[in-house]
Image (spheres, grey):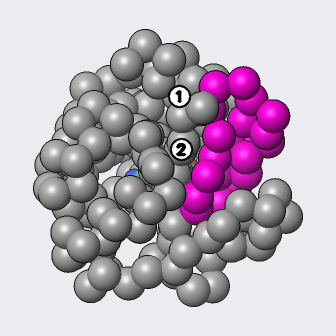
Amino acid sequence: MKHLAIFASGSGSNAEEFMKYFKNHHALKVSLVLTNKSNAGVIQRAEKFDIPCIVFSKEDLSHPEFLKILRDNKIDFIVLAGFLLKVPEYLIEAYPERILNIHPALLPKYGGKGMYGEHVHRAVLAAGENQSGITIHLVNKHYDEGRHIFQDKVIVDKDDSPESLAKKIHVLEHENYPRVAEEYFSTI
Ligand code: GAR
């Protein structure tokens, strides 16, 4: 059995899709949820699935000793699901090609520092794009620049708001992220 850790900073709807998808899975188990926000919705979601959840600070993450938490839990792979802190280099080096992120747009457009959640959808609408989508990619030391593993598109309608676009994107994320992660992690 391989062990997966999910890092999330917010509501955690994608994290919950992983918890559902890998419940009783033969090869991969969501063993740990980690969040940097003590009021993040993901905490209740982890409780519901009886998955241990650890709250940590930005300062905790900056020290390589943080790795002990992952090693103690035998973590093999990491997925970021709405995680808003930069992943430090020591963590990327400890998990080479083993950290996935999902971004709510068609990278390389609308990525980089400060581009998360609603900010991304606002920028896509402000630019008058007629399509957006999701990108699942490896995490490297630059925000949103790791190798792309998967992309899929949605149509942006003229009357879309950041909220309605976010809803469409979430549907696409939930349909694809756990499945794509499963497939990717099974090959490495
Ligand atoms: C998701 O749409 C994810 O793509 C985005 O945050 C949302 C989290 O939703 N991530 C980023 O913008 C990262 N740059 P969730 O908490 O309901 O899973």
Task: Look at the image and say whether residue 133 sits in the magenta stretch.
Answer: no
Image x and y of residue 12, in percent? 65, 60
In three-dimensional space, the C-alpha distance between marks 2 and 1, rounded to whole angstroms, equals 10 Å
Image x and y of residue 78, in percent? 44, 45
Horizontally, residue 144 falls left or right of residue 152, namely left
Which segment did they paint magenta?
Answer: 11-33
Q: Amino acid at mark 2?
A: Leu
Q: Residues within 10 Å of mark 1 (few under 14, many from 20)?
A: many
Q: Which residue is mark 1?
A: 181
Tell which of 96 and 35 is nearer to you.
96
Q: Residues within 10 Å of mark 2 (few under 14, many from 20)?
A: many
Q: Residue shown at 34%/66% (left/top)? A: 68
Q: Amino acid at mark 1?
A: Ala
Q: Earlier in the sequence, mark 2 or mark 1?
A: 2
Q: Which residue is mark 2?
A: 4
Callout 2: CB less than 8 Å from ligand 1: no
- SS under mark 1: helix
Above or below for 66 versus 137: below
Residue farthest along the top direction in this orientation: 187
